[in-house]
Amino acid sequence: MRYRKSTVFVLSGLLVATLGAVTSPTAALGSPNTNQLTALAAPEPNQVQDLSVKQADGFATLAWTPVDGATDYQIERTLLDAAGTAAGPATIVGVWRPGRQINNDEPTFADAGFNPGDRFQWRVRARFGTTEQPYSLPVSGVTTAPWGDPAVPGQNLRTQWETTKAAQYTSDVDEYAYTKTIDELSARVRVVEIGRTVLGRPINMFVIGYPTPPATPAAVAATSPLSINCNVHGNEPGDREACLVMARKLAFSDDARTIDLLKNTTVLIVPTINGDGRAANTRGNSTGQDLNRDYSLIRQPETLSFVQMVREYRPVAGYDGHEYGNSSAGDLPMLSPRHQNVARSIFDESQRMIEGHMYEHGAKDGWWPCPYGCNGGGNVGLGEETILRNTLGLKNVVNSLLELRSSGGPTRPDEGNTANNRRRKTYSAMWTFNEFLDYHRANLNGIKQARTEAITFQSGNSSRIVFRGSHLIPAHPAPHPGESPPPANAPTEDQILDNPPCAYKLTEEQYNGARTDGPGGVGFTVAQRIRAHGWKVVKVADGYVVPLAQPERGLIPLLLDAQGAEELVGGERIYPTGPVRHNGPLVVSGVTCLADGTVNGPVTVRPGATLIATGSTISGPVSAAGAAGVFLADSTVRGPVSITGTTGAVAVVDVQVSGPLSLAANGTGADLPLVAGNTVNGPLSCAGNSPAPVNLNIRNTVQGPRSGQCAGL
């Protein structure tokens, strides 16, 4: 289903059709009667035929029949008054070139940059080189006004950007008033403050659901939410304006598409993470930090707030809004998470969203999505884990970066007009974000499957570690301009660790020591940053152990290994300490790592000890009472598993258990025991764990009854 109301106006070379209030001007801009069909003269040679115009939110899609041999097409727009008379000069507002989209045989152009609600006339002509051919017959109509009935409270809200007709961007004061009013007037919306900027500005987030949003972050997480981060660079505000307008429609529209969407998920929108930079119109925040180079390191309060939100609300898909200075690129350069530690399933699904949905729907609606860096973009779109699209990918979130081409360039020559430029950017962003909502709604099962595969893969800790390097993005098949994808950015030998450790050990000073890399020379401790990321940590006698057998395994070594390109701290690598093969009972003391091991007998984890087992087979029961930590992943246990009274972290992921799986009285009130994606040939029971176990929406397969805290897992 489409988000917008569409009105289509069509003219062929032989017939003029007038429908309803639509006018089809002749040279004198006459207005035939409703349903009148008027015969016209035969078309001129190389004259564009079958021009149609479909109105949408903030743009109009022009479509026509291609002219053989044309090198490009010029789109002309003329402002009309209420009587259909020209009220301004005819202006070339667009140039359509073959090869810019995936539909050369069905050209379309999304004309934006006009004031929504005004009346216009359009014509299109082909060119052979610089030789202009005859214009098509004109088509005219009233463009779609900004959404919302001016007489209905809530719907009648407008941003400062809207009320000034794009002469001004919405100020922080107006943003807070606007979001507050939406919160007050719509039961579907809860605005939450997820943090504060360095200078103390609130970082707000819309939480939108139907009929009301879920009450807690955990309840939101259960709906497989999607998130949009709208303004990380303060001098790139187009996406932010789109988010504010879109939030109003999600809050108050009763169309079937909106209701269906919000009944089946929760939409999370962060309009302005960088409020200080937006107020100053600077790329960085008030300290000069580029926040999009800080989502892994989280040296700034803004990025810490966002990362904590991801940990608590667990979006399964996301978009991150930017603007791009290459005026020769497409309208909407996009890019998936590329770091090679991102699970292949997340990378593939993100690429499918871009190339399989955005390219296709962009071609239908006249936009020009392309890979970030297309058409001479240079050395961009690499694999730095500090960038949000890569950080989210390493957190198993299907996602994409969105760039709005910041200037019109040769394909949008009318955007020397600042307001027109701002409108095109904002409405193209709104188109993208709405397509993202539709993709999530239609493909949620695929997104969830990709996430499940990623979490089980990462928890198994079975692949090499790449400290810097990118998944390859091959050129999209012609005619789309994917022949200029981002650079390959393959890792060099010194950026690869073929033999991954099972954990990292940090000293007390490394973990809790003061840091000086934040605002004013005061930074969050490593402990605070690890907690924000949500990683499981085990306290041992002489420090802290961070196992890799957990969902964000791909990100952990990038921050805790001295070989990392931008590490937080150089932790000690802990390699497998347990036997490759052990016959008889195994008693675990200290920290024992089993990787691809075999134990022919029972395993007992002593009080205060830690077991980390990946890719292993245990032919006997596993029993842990009073352990410091228990991590089982990608393994087989031929017997029951009982984990009781663990003082630290517990994670059981993708394990086949021949017998009951029981967790009781584990935890200290901070860590969430993880029980996800297991196959249990027996009952699954959980009681007295604090907090209760979670499965990250990856259901366990259980042959027996589920009871207690695990009844819903």
Image (spheres, rainbow, N blue to C red):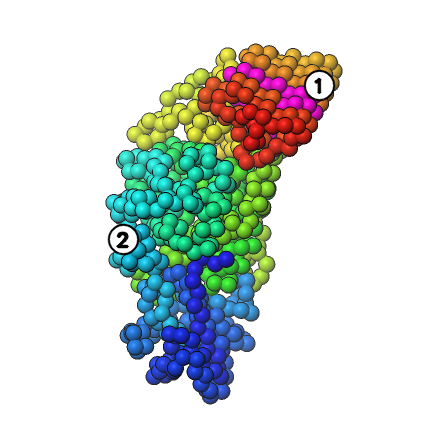
In this rendering, the answer to whether 303 lies above or below 475 is: above
* Residue under the point 49% across and 87% down: 42
Q: Nearer the viewer, residue 556 or 617?
A: 617
In this rendering, the answer to whether 515 lies above or below 260 is: above
Disc 1 residue type? Gly
Look at the image and say whether residue 516 sits in the magenta stretch. no
In this rendering, the answer to whether 666 lies above or below 291 is: above
Q: Which residues are magenta?
A: 639-661
* Residue under the point 43% across and 68% down: 7
Disc 2 residue type? Gln
Local SS, label 2 = helix
**Is residue 411 among what the camera can see?**
no
Q: Quadrant of residue 601?
A: top right
Q: Is 313 displayed left or right of 197 in the figure? A: right
Q: Nearer the viewer, residue 96 or 537?
A: 537
Q: Is 519 displayed left or right of 124 in the figure? A: left
Which percent across, then down, holds residue 667?
A: 50, 19
In this rendering, the answer to whether 611 lies above or below 406 is: above
> Mark 2 sits on what residue?
160
* Residue under the point 31% across and 46% down: 185
> Mark 1 sits on what residue?
620
Q: Nearer the viewer, residue 511 or 36?
A: 36
